[in-house]
Structure formats: C-alpha cells, structure tokens
Image (tube, rainbow, N blue to C red):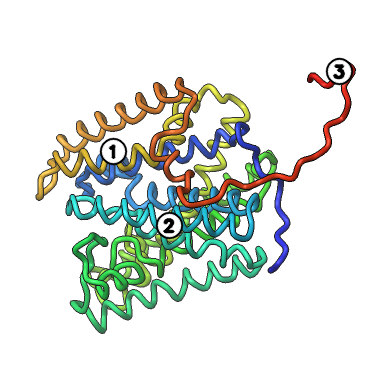
Amino acid sequence: MTEVHAPPVPREGRRLGGIDAARGLAILGMIIVNVGPTAPETILQRVYLLPFGRASVLFVTIAGLGMGYFMRSRAGKELWTAITWRVGLLFLIGAALQTLTETVNVILQTYSVLFLLAPLLWRLSSRALLALGLGIMVAGPLWIVTHDVTQPWGHAMEGISFTTAPGDALHSLVLTGPYPLASWTVPFIAGLLLSRVDLADVRRLHRMIGWGALAAVLAFLVADLSYAVLGPEADQGFARYFTGVGHGQMPLWLISSIGGAVFSIAVCQRLAQLAPWTIGWLARCGRLAFTIYVLHVLVLAVIKPADGFSFERGVLVALALNLGAVTLGVLWARTGRQGPLEWLLRHSWFRTPPTRPATPQPATPNGGQS
C-alpha cells in the first residue's frame, strides 16, 4: 500500500465547520433541483437554477473528502466492516426511495458503490490518484457517448429501484443512469484528494478559491462557446463530448462543476475561520444532510406531480422545503445528537466494538482520583 502523507484528521467534536456548511449548501441546492423544473427560460430563472449540475457534484466531492478522513483513522477489518455496512445501507435506502418515486433521481446507489471503491482508490499515491481522475474524466464521458451512439435504446436510463432488472441496474450504475460511475467517480476522487490537503491553511484555501473559480467559469464559457460553434447538432452523436450542459456527464461539465465545488468548500471553510456565525445555520443543516435528503425525497414522492411543477410553484415548494431543512437542522443541533439516519449510517449492527489495550495510569497527587 502506498503511504499517504496528509494533514492530521480533525478529531471528533472538532469538525471542520466549513465542510459541514458546504454540505448544507449542497443539500439545499439539491432540493431546488429535485423540486424543479430545471429548464430556465429567463436570465433570472437561470440564476435560480445555478445549483443544477453543481449541487450534486459538490455533494459527491464532500463525500469523497469525508471518506478520506474516515479511512485515515481506520484500517483492516474495522475499515471494511464499517464500509460494508454503509454500502449496503445506502444502496437499500436509495433503491427503496427510487421505487417510491419516478420524479426524483436518487443518488444514493451511486454513493454506495463509490464508498465500496474508496479503500482501493485510497491505496494510490496522490499523483497516481490525480492521474486516474484525469483519465476517467477524459475516457469515461467518451465511453458514455460511444455507448449512446452505438446503442441508443439498448438499456434503461432510469435510476435503480427494487424493480430494476440486474442487467439494467449494472448499466445504470456504470453508463446510462442519472449518476453513472463513468463520470461521477471523478468528483469523488477530487474529494479524496482534498482530504489530503490541509484545509486549515489560509494560503491554500485562497489558492483553492482562485483556481476553483477559474475552472468553474472558464469551462462554463468554453461550453457555451462550444454550443455556438456546433449549433443545433451539439447534443447529438460524438459532438456531445464537447458540450457542458448540467448533468450531461461530459468533461467540460465535470471541470466546471468540480471547480465550483472546490471554490464552495474553500469559501465555506474560510468563512468558518473568519466569521463562523455567518454559516453556523448552514453547518447545522449539513450535519443532518443524509436525514434531510431522505425526508425531502419522501415528501416529493407524495406531492410532486408526474409532469412536474410549474416554475412559480416549484420555487415556492423548494423555498418551503429549504426553510424546513434549515429549521430542522438548527433545532436538532440543540439536542447535541447525531441525526437519526446519520447515527444509523455510523452504527454497524454486526461489527465488534474495538478493544483497546489497557494502559497503566500514572499516579496522581490526590490518591489516583483525576
């Protein structure tokens, strides 16, 4: 196994508030996208829908970042037991949610597979991990486009539910689904790499803000230019490879959305250093992100019509859900406990609690009482 040099893992109880806030930002953005609609007709609507194609990438990038911290403090059987539990739980909950609704694409199934791959990816050096991420960013979208051109109706493109056939489930996970591994592995790898960076270093955060913003804006502009050059055929055939539409799975979208994720994480972390009160509410929401995600999908499964909301109604529903999410996060934080699904995710029912060897206690002046 390649030795990984990384800054110290934040201790439990000393969480990086900026990471929690960025996760909260991601979940609120995902609520906006999942409520919909996602086809803007005006500039104002386009600004409102900035989270489209970005919030979920931020979510996955933070998942990679968190998994990196997780793996640095565990090894061997303890690591694999905990990851196996999380993989199984996420996949089952994701498939159950997708069975309940066809109006929301559930991301948890892809999450589960990325978690399963994480220990293997973690063995790579940072340079090799970066090279792998860049390689997948180039080759993965090309594989997707080639598959779509040669087998346009060969497999289902929906998310995985309990009714999905095994063959369709495999193709959905890898190529044809809303969150295929052929492209979504890249932001997860970006998160793993960020976990090897000292996010308490101010100069590093400033560089992340600058380079992240540059990548996000530049790739977005190139994608718009690509549409102008390619014309109405831009989204067809192999020409699609050079586009950058949100959730289009292509390289320009990956560069722009991951750049935006790096920018968001660094800004939130810097704000946590300078004025933590400004994002405290967002961090509390982020600590409850898994619970909030599942709850909002359940609500949308009940209230979202098959043909979606009108834009005005969608804004109102998203606003109500986001206010509810923030309120829940703030109120739950007062209990001092983990969220119910966060606790479930971290509690493996079949693992053996780690035993620590007894260590001699030093004598104290008050007769051993300390």
Residue holding disc 1: 295
Report the mark closest to the observer, 3 or 1.
Answer: 3
C-alpha separation, residue under disc 3 versus residue under disc 2: 49 Å
Q: What is the x, y in percent for residue 192?
A: 57, 56
Q: What is the x, y in percent for residue 132?
A: 56, 71
Nearest the viewer among 301 and 342 is 342
In the rendered view, tell whether residue 51 sits above or below residue 75: above
Q: Position of 81 compared to 179: left or right?
A: right
Q: Secondary structure at mark 2?
A: helix
Residue holding disc 3: 367
Q: Residue at x 50, y 42 (%)?
A: 264
C-alpha separation, residue under disc 3 versus residue under disc 1: 53 Å
In the rendered view, tell whether residue 218 sits above or below residue 321: below
Q: What is the x, y in percent for residue 241?
A: 36, 72
Q: Residue at x 58, y 37 (%)?
A: 269
Q: Position of 151 compared to 360: left or right?
A: left
What's the amino acid at mark 1?
A: Leu
Report the mark closest to the observer, 1 or 2.
Answer: 2
First in residue order: circle 3 vs circle 2: 2
Q: Residue at x 36, y 71 (%)?
A: 174
Nearest the viewer among 71 and 315 is 71
Residue at the extreme bottom: 150
What's the amino acid at mark 2?
A: Val
Give yes or no for contact between labels 1 and 2 (Cβ–Cβ under 8 Å): no
Quarter of the picture containing the N terminus is bottom right
Residue holding disc 2: 87
Classify mark 2: residues with Cα within 10 Å, few (<14), some (14-19) or many (20+).
Answer: many
Classify mark 1: residues with Cα within 10 Å, few (<14), some (14-19) or many (20+).
Answer: some
Q: Position of 137 compared to 229: left or right?
A: right
First in residue order: circle 3 vs circle 1: 1
